[in-house]
Image (tube, rainbow, N blue to C red):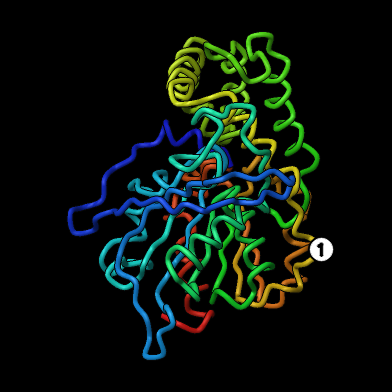
């Protein structure tokens, strides 16, 4: 889930033949589920490719891709994702598809606490984030249909919500590194550890800090612990000295691009997530991808396997631990699961 580790990934620009366009969509007087309102909510987004409409004027080539907690759409531009999917002849070839990748509320270049409101920023949840994404698609880009909705971690959870809230709007769904159930158990514990570490830090000052709260280092160590897998970590950190050196390097880089209020809001936003009541509403073919080494969504709980039976065209895949899996972060390594994406595109009726 934790896309703050994007800072540790090699982000490579796409070729000149595949230019990325960045824009902002402003929603006036946005009403949050909390009852709060924002006069202007900015949703930043990146697109690749050209939008196409059929003879009746309906969009037929749009793909919506949603990022994880703490990340942004920039995280999809690296070799492990864009390099495997967006090139000529690849599954989401941008000469054929129009790719839309928004930054969620509180993330990237979209409106967020660190813009100036700090702790006065409206309390947002996943329902608000999905609502804003939908308004970008329907009102901002005038897209009436999506070939595919897919997302990683938090974006995977949003994908489940899209399938339930807008069941006639997409041909296919692919949630990665997520389960269709409430945030509970260990998943809730690590979030609470981070939330409490920030809120109980005396230097946080109720969100009005003048310097980075001291506990942010602990926050990033927790994130580092939850990412990856034990085999990967053993290779990276074979001795105590090497482990300490790697931790110092990774945490140092994560500290450089983070903000405590943004982090607190992002982790708190998941409290309203629980799509389990409405899974039967999903109409589009859906393939959910998890990995056996994911600490956040451990397969031994059987949540995905149990609930997928309620999705009429659902398929659940749990990739086994292997030399190339990255724990929860496997969601951004398309080479691990792109064969399942090919199958989903084929069985959802279009090529």
- Front position in the image: 120 or 54: 120
Counting from the top left corner in percent of width and height, residue 135 is at 54, 61
Counting from the top left corner in percent of width and height, residue 327 is at 57, 41
Q: Residue at x 75, y 43 (%)?
A: 271
Q: Is residue 106 visible?
A: yes
Q: Residue at x 59, y 59 (%)?
A: 175
Q: Residue at x 35, y 58 (%)?
A: 47
- Residue furthest to the left in view is 16
Q: Quadrant of residue 18?
A: bottom left
The quarter of the picture where the N terminus appears is: top right
Q: In the rendered view, would you say 333 is above or below 196? A: below
Instruction: Judge the density around disc 1: few (<14), some (14-19), many (≥20) Cα neighbours within 10 Å.
Output: few
Q: Is residue 320 visible?
A: no
Q: Quadrant of residue 174?
A: bottom right
Q: Is residue 350 left or right of residue 50?
A: right
- Residue highlighted by disc 1: 277
Counting from the top left corner in percent of width and height, residue 57 is at 40, 85
Q: Is residue 158 left or right of residue 95?
A: right
Q: How many marks?
A: 1
Q: Secondary structure at mark 1?
A: helix
- Residue furthest to the bottom in view is 55
């Amino acid at each position: 889930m934790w896309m703050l580790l994007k800072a540790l990934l090699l982000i490579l620009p796409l070729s000149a033949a595949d230019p990325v366009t960045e824009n902002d969509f402003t929603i006036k007087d946005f009403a949050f589920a909390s009852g709060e309102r924002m006069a202007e909510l900015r949703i930043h987004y990146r697109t690749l490719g050209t939008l196409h409409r059929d003879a009746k004027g309906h969009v037929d080539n749009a793909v919506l891709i949603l990022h994880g907690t703490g990340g942004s759409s920039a995280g999809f531009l690296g070799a492990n994702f864009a390099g495997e999917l967006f090139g000529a002849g690849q599954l989401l070839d941008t000469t054929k598809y129009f790719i839309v990748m928004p930054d969620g509320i509180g993330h990237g270049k979209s409106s967020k606490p660190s813009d100036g409101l700090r702790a006065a920023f409206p309390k947002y949840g996943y329902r608000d984030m999905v609502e804003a994404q939908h308004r970008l698609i329907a009102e901002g880009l005038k897209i009436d249909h999506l070939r595919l909705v897919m997302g990683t971690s938090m974006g995977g959870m949003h994908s489940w919500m899209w399938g339930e809230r807008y069941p006639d709007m997409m041909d296919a769904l692919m949630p990665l590194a997520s389960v269709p159930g409430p945030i509970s158990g260990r998943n809730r514990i690590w979030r609470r550890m981070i939330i409490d570490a920030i809120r109980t830090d005396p230097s946080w000052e109720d969100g009005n800090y003048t310097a980075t709260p001291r506990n942010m280092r602990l926050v990033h160590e927790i994130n580092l612990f939850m990412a990856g897998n034990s085999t990967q970590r053993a290779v990276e950190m074979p001795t105590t000295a090497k482990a300490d050196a790697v931790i110092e390097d990774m945490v140092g880089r994560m500290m450089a691009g983070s903000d405590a209020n943004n982090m607190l809001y992002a982790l708190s936003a998941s409290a309203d997530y629980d799509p389990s009541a409405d899974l039967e509403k999903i109409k589009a073919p859906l393939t959910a991808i998890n990995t056996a080494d994911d600490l956040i969504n451990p397969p031994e709980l059987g949540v995905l396997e149990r609930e997928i039976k309620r999705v009429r065209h659902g398929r659940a895949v749990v990739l086994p631990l292997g030399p190339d899996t990255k724990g929860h972060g496997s969601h951004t390594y398309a080479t691990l699961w792109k064969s399942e994406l090919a199958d989903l595109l084929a069985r959802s009726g279009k090529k």
